Image (cartoon, coloured by chain):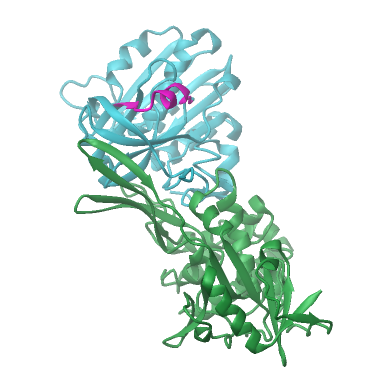
Amino acid sequence: MNLLASKDNLIRWLDLLLHEHVVIAPVRVQGLTLFQPISKAEEVDLDFDNTTLPPKGWFLPPTETLFSVQRNDGQTKLVPAMVERDALIFGVRPCDARGIALMDKPLLQEPSDALYRERHARTVLVGLSCRQARPECFCTSMGSAPNDASYVDILLTEIEVGYIVQVTSKKGKMLLPESFTEYEGVLPTPPEPRAVPIKDVMPAMKGLFDDTYWERLADRCLHCSICAYVCPTCYCFDVRDYSDRGNIERVRSWESCQSSGFTRIAGGYNPRATKGSRLKQRFYHKLLYFPEQFQDIACVGCGRCIKACPVNIDIREIIDDLQQLEAKSGA
Amino acid sequence: MGLENPFLPYLATIKSTVELTPDVKLLRVELEDAAIRGSFDYKPGQFAFLSAFGEGEAPFGIVSLPRHQDDLEFAVRQIGTVTRALHELEPGDTLGVRGPFGNYFPLEDYAGKNMVIIGGGIGMAPLRPVINKILEQRDNYGNLLVINGARTPQDLVFRPEFQTWMEAPRTQLELTVDRGDEHWGGRVALVPDVLRELAPSPDNAIAIICGPPIMIHFTLAVLKGLGFKDDQIVTTLEAKMKCGLGKCARCNVGDKYVCQDGPVFTLEQISQFLEQP
């Protein structure tokens, strides 16, 4: 049974949640919509198409300490970092929630990533259906949908009189207030994002590793890595030590396969020395290697990389090109 | 309560260091916790991360053989910031060890086979425990040919062991350098050329190869010319690694992660998605 929350009740519910949770919600900041911790419900801006960045940083922070090194009287002690907060992320789009589910596959696979796992276990996701598709959206081709409730604990869908509330998990159920009433109406028809046929891309890619396509495509790439930065499924990271006046910390931070240092080993050898080989890695990892390993394409169709790329590299075109190229060479 | 954090290394102590070449040191390392020391089991080909706290962590093949001694041995070439810090460690100093990681050379599967082992420079490090394991169980294997190349005679990493290797039954050790010196009476030639000249038969043979990418590239061509098939050629890949857990994706090659699925691969397993040097 679905519930209905009036807009006022939703605000009151959010204020209630703030007593017991760190609530992270879309906030308008200097023209961007970003997930940020809020202190009162009025700060939330639910009038957005999608947030500028996905919420992945609340699971895998852009930078985090893994452990610190303490030295006393010649004795060394390693102190692991801890996750201290329960969090509720409010207003997550279904595609981005699927992004978290996809990151789970490598990061929760044994031996699981302890900090990610802990943060995940202590986070509730309240989703928000999309009432319109952006021009760059293609979620339905990537295993999700504008009204997909599969990867959130609660899904809200805006209608004229308020929000329809679908509860999909025990975690979600425990958070509901009594003020929500039963809703017996139908769910609104979701928008239809553009379709990107992808059926033949995996077999096509197996034959295109040495194709000149990649260097040609990469000619205009600036290797700025914005595509990885905004991607809800990119999870590659770097680990380094930072020391400051005797305090030593081992720190993890986001890293992108588009940076030339990503695979360069000490001494200078780089197995992916060209932009083409690096751009190729991005798409092989997302469209072939990840599905081979985990059965899902590592893309949710949010279209952020398409919107953000300064030189208009478009994953939808690439998916199409690869299938065309292979069809041509096979003919 | 602490999470069991797979990024947390074991604490260890430097027992001794030996200068193997002008830029390679053998580090003998003892894990501090006796229980962990007792259960730390590994096989030739596996690796561990060494931490020089404050500088960082990098992966190294374990060059000792398990159960011979409690100490772990690593041959570390000074080539970057972490290895420079590791070279500065002295007996008694603390470092971190995380591992063992990765797969290993399936030496049991090679019983009865002729072994061709080809190493260049510090690429000999992961091959040393392979050679020593074969020599330890000499009767289990056919002929053993070791080709070891280096830039100069001084850069041949395991010189103190050459005599033992040379004197072992049915074992041939061929040394070669890019540039000789006044004491060098041996070969001055590139590894692929030495291999072509010696022309070991591919019949019932396995070739294991490790070295700089360019050496591997040209040596593979010679091996194929001699008739070695992709499933008879085994290599251990060097790759940038940060986690050892198959997560950071730095060492991703095809659907494989060098840190988890490797570092030991047959050419058959990886040739499709390797970039050419």
Closer to us: A269 or B133:
B133
Give the percent coordinates (x, y) of residue B98. 41, 37
Horizontal placement of A89 versus B212: left or right? right
Quadrant position of the C terminus of chain A in the picture: bottom right
- Whether the magenta-drawn stretch holds residue B29 is answered as yes
Q: Residue at x 19, y 53 (%)?
A: A245
> Left of B115 or right of it: where is B269?
right
In the rendered image, residue A303 lying in the magenta stretch gets the answer no
Q: Is residue B160 left or right of residue A319?
A: left
Q: Which residues are magenta?
A: B28-42
Q: Is residue B36 above or below residue A286?
A: above
In x, y percent, where is residue A171? 66, 63
For the point 34% across and 28% down, the residue is B32
Give A171 or A270, whichever is nearer the viewer: A171
Whether residue B9 can be seen here:
yes
Q: Is residue A230 above or below residue B143?
A: below
Q: In green, which chain?
A: A
Looking at the colours in the rendered structure, which chain would you say is drawn in cyan? B
Q: Residue furthest left?
A: B182
Q: Quadrant of the N terminus of chain A?
A: bottom right
* Image vertical order of residue B196 relative to residue A69, above or below: above
Q: Foreground residue, A318 or A18?
A: A18
Q: Residue furthest bottom?
A: A160
- Horizontally, residue A307 falls left or right of residue B216, namely right
Q: Is residue B236 above or below residue B108?
A: below
Q: Residue furthest front?
A: A178
Residue shown at the point (73%, 84%) measured from the top left: A191
Percent x, y of residue A303:
59, 76
Question: Residue B7, position in %: x, y?
Answer: 43, 45
